Each structure stands twice: as C-alpha cells, then as structure tokens.
Image (spheres, grey):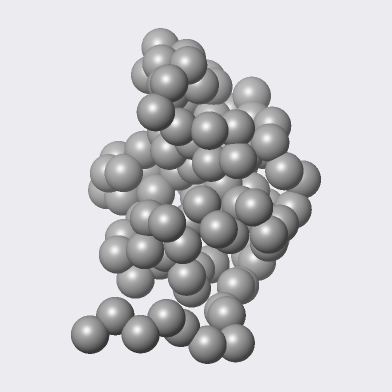
Amino acid sequence: MKAYLLFSGSGTLVVLSQHDDVEHELFLEKLAGKGIYKFIAHEIPLELAKERYGKHFDIATHDLYETDHLRVVDYNGERAMRLFKFSELGPEIMHEPDRFPEVF
C-alpha cells in the first residue's frame, strides 16, 4: 500500500492505494469518480502516515465504503499540510489528462 499527498483543484487530500504507481489506470478512475482529474502527488512514507494519523489511519484502512484502489485518509488539506513537512515527501508527480470530461 502507498500513501500520497495530492494537490488538486478541489483541495489537498491524503489517500492510500494498493498500486505502486499513482498513475495506475484503476487509481486514476477512482480519483475521476471523485472529480479529480489533474493533480500533483507526493508519496508519503507509509509508516510516517500511520504514525501521524494514528487511530484515524486504522479507521480509514477499514472503511467499507472505500476500495483498495483508493482510500481517502484526509479531506482536510489544512491538517494534511500541518502533519507533513515538504522534506518528508517523495518527489512530485504531476498528472494531467489529455482531455477533461465536459461538465457543464
């Protein structure tokens, strides 16, 4: 399992995925289902995420409404930014689709 800090147009969030690649097709499909198409991601060391979120991390990993393709740990970008220093994050991965769905 991998943990990622995502910066998207709708805000910052922390997510978990069973995929080793943040650009895995199934992971991207799950993000798209939440309206996230374009983002900048940084991997968070999994043990560090567990340590910082404590019991909340355990709850998120057992949430029956999420899947192993995408589990949201934190929707609160302000909290996520307080919990992790930039120096603790992996290199940035920028994802931008070739085209966006029409949503008007």
Is 43 placed above or below 51 here? below
Image coordinates of residue 28 in percent, x first then y, are 58, 59
Toward the right, the furthest residue is 20
Image coordinates of residue 11 in percent, x first then y, are 31, 60
Q: Residue at position x 72%, y 43% from top?
A: 19
Is 101 placed above or below 52 here? below
Viewer-side residue, 101 vs 76: 101
Q: Residue at position x 29%, y 80% from top?
A: 103
Image coordinates of residue 38 in percent, x first then y, are 48, 73
Viewer-side residue, 59 vs 66: 66
Please state, as top left, top right, bottom left or bottom right, where the C terminus lies in the image: bottom left
Q: Is residue 53 visible?
A: no
Q: Residue at position x 45%, y 43% from top?
A: 14
> Toward which corner of the image does residue 20 lie, by quadrant?
top right
Image coordinates of residue 4 in percent, x first then y, are 57, 46
Q: Is residue 66 visible?
A: yes
Question: In the rendered picture of this protein, how many numbered marks are placed on residues?
Answer: 0
Q: Residue at position x 45%, y 32% from top?
A: 66
Viewer-side residue, 51 vs 100: 100
